[in-house]
Structure formats: C-alpha cells, structure tokens
Image (spheres, rainbow, N blue to C red):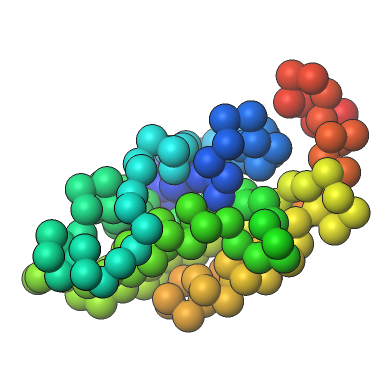
Amino acid sequence: MATPIRILAFAGSLRRDSWNKKVLKIAVEGPLAAGAEVTVLDLKDLPMPVYDGDIETAEGVPAKAKEFKALMKSHDAFLIASPEYNSSIPGGLKNAIDWASRQEPDEKPLACFKDKVAALVSASPGALGGVRSLMAIRLILSNLMVLVIPEQVSVMKVHEALDDQGVLK
C-alpha cells in the first residue's frame, strides 16, 4: 500500500472563532476521505515574535518558528484557509511564513517549502469571500517554490453559508 499524502492544514487567522478555521474544518474532510493524513494546526499555538533580522542574528530562529518549520518539512502539502485583512494576507500568517523561510545552519534554502503543494481557501462575510488574500498568498508561496494548485475556494457571505455549529448549509 502506498504511503498516504501528509497535509498540514492551518488557518491564517489567529482569532478563536474564525470563519476560516470553521471552513478549514470542512475543507479537511475531502483529503481525509481520500485517505490523506491531515494535521490541523492552529497558528495561535505557535506564537512567534514579529520577524526581525536583529532577533535572528542575536538569538537565531525562535523555537516556535522551528517547530512550525519542522511540521512543514514533515508534510507533503499545505491546506491554508485565510481571511483577507485590508485586501491582503493576515499579519500572523505572513510572519509565520517569513520565519519559516529563514535558512538555518546545515539546511537547504527554503527547505520547508521546496517541492511542496498548497491548496488555498478563504471565507469572509463580504461579497468577495477573501479572494484578494489568496492572490497575495499564491504570490508569496509560488516565490518560495511551492506549487499552488490553480483551483481555489472563496466562501463569500460565510455567515450565511454556515449554520451556528459551523456546518455548511
């Protein structure tokens, strides 16, 4: 039997009751049903300081960023659900990506990104469903050598698409 694909799934939002965390919970059902192994991560559980080259020089890559990188390295693909903040990517998600991109001693450049595949979803109460954040995330990940699949899902008016338990209507 072939080794199942390992997917690291996480939301770009740090908010506890995030629409994107709810949509991510729904989105992982497909890969799980297809036999993939899915690890759902909450970025809030891995707090990292704002990326600062001075911190990196003085202290190295923070422990939580190393933990995030290790998770990324141990998975074949990423499933990212991200809200749109001011027509772009949330700061916490961008910060995690920035720290993960830092090369450590005895590590190849972009080790946790290269040869990975990513799927993107977004959700928003607005009419665009967060689609502008996905364009920014696609650009960033593509530049980091991640193959971002062309199909993406944006759930517009998410507050009307999900019931009170976070189930798709």
Residue farthest toward the top in the current orientation of the protein: 165
Where is residue 158? Give x, y as percent. Answer: 82, 40
Where is residue 143? Give x, y as percent. Answer: 48, 80
Q: For this view, does 79 lie left or right of residue 50?
A: right
Image quadrant assignment for residue 85: bottom right
Residue at 12 percent across and 65 percent down: it is 58
Name the quadrant of the C terminus.
Answer: top right
Image quadrant assignment for residue 111: bottom left
Count of marks placed on residues: 0
Name the quadrant of the N terminus.
Answer: top left
Residue at 66 percent across and 42 percent down: it is 20
Q: For this view, does 108 lie left or right of residue 58?
A: right
Where is residue 79? Give x, y as percent. Answer: 54, 51
- In this rendered view, identify the residue nearer to me: 127 or 76: 127
Residue 34 visible in the displayed image: no
Residue farthest toward the bottom in the current orientation of the protein: 143
Where is residue 92? Give x, y as percent. Answer: 48, 53
Query: Vertically, is 132 above or below 16?
Result: below
- In this rendered view, identify the residue nearer to me: 8 or 33: 8
Residue 95 visible in the displayed image: yes
Query: Vertically, is 86 above or below 46?
Result: below
- In this rendered view, identify the residue nearer to me: 80 or 38: 80
Residue at 50 percent across and 71 percent down: it is 141
Residue at 21 percent across and 70 percent down: it is 54
Residue farthest toward the left in the current orientation of the protein: 106
